[in-house]
Amino acid sequence: MQKPLIAVLITSALLTLNVTTEAQAADLIQIYQQALANDATYASARSSLSAGQERIIQGRAGLLPSISASGSNLRNSGDVTAPNILGIRTKNDTDYHSNAYTVSLTQPLFNWANWESYQQSKLATATAEASFAQAQQDLITRVAQAYFDVLTAQDNLTSTRAQKVATTEQLASAKRNFEVGTQTITDTHEAQAAYDLVVAAEYAAINDLDNKRAALQVIIGQMPGELAPLRTGVTITPPSPAAMEPWVSSAETQNYGVVAANLNVEIAKREISRNRASHMPTLNLVASSSHQNQTAGQTVNNNAIGVSWSVPIFSGFAVTSKVRETIALEDKARNDLEATKRAAAQGARAAYLGMNSGLAQVKALEAAEVSSKSSLESNKLGYQVGVRINIDVLNAQKLLYSTQKDLSKARYDTIVNGLRLKSAAGSLKEEDLATINAMLVH
């Protein structure tokens, strides 16, 4: 028996796609590397990390000595009127030039507020590092999601065009059979309606693909070319461990959002102590050296060293109010931490259930694809011998293509949910992309 036209066209299209893919397609790792270099959100997070790393230096500065120098170079003009020994008032000019400078050093000996600021600076740097680690994980999941969104749109378009070819063949067959009188005009109308619908679906699929490619362009900074597709019949590894609770427990403790929120609680506690320190005395070591000379030849040198202290007595209740404010902010930070924990745990649960549900869907849809192919062949044969009508073939074709689209999307969603699960648990690494990249056609 001669091969049906649809099989020949699909085979030819797939061969052409494979050749193009092997020659030009970019894989997931290449797209991720472009995102590392061009994604504005990731670049912003990297700059925030650089800024956060300066906090320790700034906090430590309050504990180190400060040295300053000051000076003046003045031209003085005036006079002095005073009685002499005879009681006669005389006027004397006092024009002179003076030059003076002072170098001073201050070393804090006890300043609890500065000490707490230093401890806060270390926590702030750790928070910046946790936020950047979260941004790295977010970039991995965003790239993977955008990559597979493009593949999903491409699969939809390819399937729609294959369905268009099949519907065109079925429409031509219905017209021939009507002309020779073996079928009614109803079969032709049904085939024409199916063809018109698939043409409309093709336009929608083209638009969706353009949108998905534009979304990926936002991340990588340029319009993507051909992307490497997923290998046929690829096996997706289930989550390990296979139980949900270890993932949830890890999300509540190791998720980078939770880590940052926990650090914010510690910063808030230090802020309370820092404000309470405004009631405490401060003690500094001070040293200075000064020199002054005048045109009259008078020179004054002075060196001093010792300690200075300050005891706050009353500040209009400002310190007490500030302490109450920071206590309320600490309570807010604790509630934010609890909300972040719950969100991380829920994200882990949703990703875990989504991945396991996806694996089950993939298995069921693989079986459905086999059944749909068999159903289509049976309906085609039945149509040829007259026991099936045209609408049966069209419905079987639509079911097959719909199953194939659902199967590819289920695979993509399952893979992305696996990445989201590891991200929620705080264990997502760039190496996880390499594992997925090995599933692609190279």
Image (tube, helix red, strand yellow):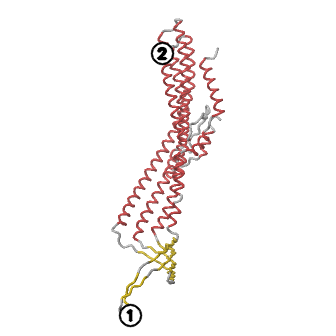
Q: Is residue 171 above or below residue 417?
A: above
- The answer to which of marks 1 and 2 sits earlier in the sequence is 1
Amino acid type, callout 2: Glu
Residue drawn at x 49%, y 51% as measured from the top left: 257
Quarter placement of the N terminus: top right
Q: Please identify, in this view, whether the residue under mark 1 or under mark 2 is nearer the observer.
A: 1
Residue 324 point in image, percent of width and height: 36, 62
Instruction: Report the Cα–Cα distance between label 1 and label 2.
Output: 133 Å
Residue 248 point in image, percent of width and height: 50, 47
Q: Which numbered circle lies on residue 190?
A: 2
Residue 254 point in image, percent of width and height: 52, 52
Considering depth in this image, is 36 or 73 the residue closer to the camera? 73
Label 1 sits on residue: 85
Quarter placement of the C terminus: top right
Determine the secondary structure under disc 1.
loop
- Mark 2 nearby-residue class (10 Å; few <14, some 14–19, many ≥20): some
Residue drawn at x 51%, y 14% as measured from the top left: 390
